[in-house]
Image: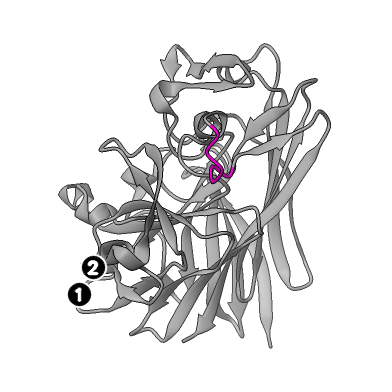
Amino acid sequence: MGFRFWYQEFEKEGFIRLGCDKEGKPWMSVDVYPSMGFKTAGLCYKGEWLQPYQPGWSPLLQKETFGNTVLFPTPNRVRNGVFTFQGRRVEMRKGGILQTQHGLAQSGFWRVTNLSKAGGEVFISAEFCICPGDENYQAFPYASRLTVTYVLTADGLTCRYGVKNLENDAMPFGFGLHPWFLLPKKPEKISVRVPADYCYETTPDLLPTGRMIAVSENKEFDLNEFRPVRNLDLDTVYLTRGREMVICYEDRGYRLKISQSSEFMAGVVFTAFNRGMEKTGYEAFCVESQTCCTDAINMHEKGFEKSGLMVLKPGQVQEGHVRYTLTDS
């Protein structure tokens, strides 16, 4: 159908753009930031930005936590930056600071291992390692290697990940992606659907209590049918069990489907524009894929069955994916 795949390096801005043209016109592209946690941003479809992009959003994109951030080995929050696993207490202290949110990969060194195009795709791969003696190992004393590959095709973007335990002991971990999506200006309509029977009850500081909330009995949390994003005020973790989440761009005539492999137990909806972000002059929201709930290691150790925590034996590998697909409504 006349698709051409390409990539371009923007050294000054610090990102690599993966792109696809159709019959000589821009069709789809995404920006990858290797030196900022190997995150992505700037997802563009048919000339329309779905995610924050350069240069308009450059001040926020310079922050490691903004964009589509890789969350590893502890997605979301860790209570007080401390966890206990199999009787071992760990303070996640990196550079003298307790790491209470979003893990270590977002602020760690990533090594790009491949950048290429072949057939109907263009892709980039990188790895993040936690090794004895480095600052990440001090915060998370489990030698391990995370590999991530972003693959851009004509109909979407796939993130493939693999985690290998290089330690001699069992390793607890979780993996997630934290994408920010632009909130279109009024009156354009956008809605979201997150299939889940339950969400996680949390304390005021957004840590799980160990109780689940039935969304059928609490309609403010129920996203099983499409609901307008502007009407939501959420920072909520849902028990999605790997089911597909969807963002519908009603006036544009297409949908963004977020599908993931079965280990992704949780989906997060964060309407940041209703929770202080509007004060920055920008409006955006998040629909996140995570393999586990917030504070998963501690919750697992308390016997919480729905923590979603993954545990790898020495030498074991866990692989999976998250895919963002664009389709006509």
Quick one: label 1, few (<14), some, or many (20+) residues within 10 Å? few
Choose between 326 and 271: the one closer to the eye. Answer: 271
The reply to whether callout 1 and callout 2 are in contact (CB within 8 Å) is yes
Q: Earlier in the sequence, mark 1 or mark 2?
A: 1
Q: Quadrant of residue 220?
A: bottom left
307 inside magenta stretch:
yes
Q: Residue at x 45, y 30 (%)?
A: 78
Residue 309's x, y, as percent? 60, 39
Q: What is the number of the mark on residue 152?
A: none
Q: Secondary structure at mark 1?
A: loop
181 inside magenta stretch:
no
Residue 222's x, y, as percent? 34, 67
Highlighted range, magenta: 303-308
Mark 2: amino acid: Arg
Q: Secondary structure at mark 2?
A: helix
Q: Quadrant of residue 262?
A: bottom right
Residue that label 2 marks: 230
Q: Is residue 174 left or right of residue 210?
A: right
Kindly report the distance in space between the C-alpha atoms of the residues bearing marks 1 and 2: 10 Å
Q: Is residue 116 left or right of residue 296?
A: right
Mark 1: amino acid: Lys
Q: How many marks?
A: 2
Q: Quadrant of residue 210?
A: top left
Residue that label 1 marks: 186
Q: Is residue 111 above or below residue 181?
A: above
Residue 268's x, y, as percent? 42, 54
Residue 219's x, y, as percent? 28, 67
Q: Is residue 39 visible?
A: no
